[in-house]
Amino acid sequence: MRAFILAAIAAMVALPLTACSTAGSGDIDWNKVAALQPGQSRAEVEGAIGRPYMASVDADGNVQLIWVNSDVNMFTGSVASSSLKLSFDKDGHLIKVPPLDAIRR
């Protein structure tokens, strides 16, 4: 009986932990994004804000890095997501930093 009670308590403690889900490249630190400067290397940018979720290359050889973060709370049904896309020239330097008010959070 004691083992059953301990198992029930463990299940009640663990259940809320499974009710939330996070996907993507992780939280985006917008203060670090605001500090980025055009001309920084891809390695510098990734060192500052983390690895992107995905990358693509356009016809001109420019690289787009995309960071995505989505949090889902299965109890409340709420979803919070943010994304960031930065473009780098074919030499691997940041082309521009979009104004934070223009970025969808």
Image (cartoon, rainbow, N blue to C red):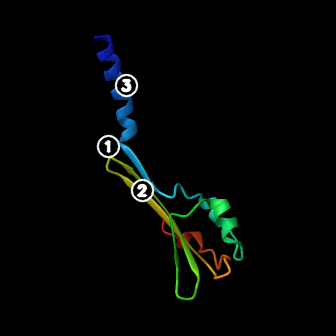
Three-letter residue code for mark 1? Phe
Q: CA distance from mark 2 to mark 3?
A: 29 Å
Check whether the beta carbons of the residues at disc 2 and disc 3 lie within 8 A of each other. Answer: no
| Camera-side mark, 2 or 3 | 3
Residue 79, given in percent of the width and then of the height, sits at 38, 55
Residue at 49% over, 65% down = 83
Q: Quadrant of residue 41?
A: bottom right
Residue 86, given in percent of the width and then of the height, sits at 58, 73
Three-letter residue code for mark 3? Ala
Three-letter residue code for mark 2? Ala
Give whichever of 48, 98 is nearer the camera. Answer: 48
Q: Quadrant of residue 36?
A: bottom right
Residue at 37% over, 40% down = 18
The residue tagged 2 is 80
Of pointers 1 and 3, the one earlier in the residue sequence? 3
Q: CA distance from mark 1 to mark 2?
A: 14 Å
Residue 75's tag is 1
Q: Is residue 39 left or right of residue 72?
A: right
Residue 8's tag is none
Residue at 34% over, 28% down = 12
Q: Is residue 14 left or right of residue 100?
A: left
Residue 10's tag is 3
Quick one: label 1, few (<14), some, or many (20+) residues within 10 Å? few
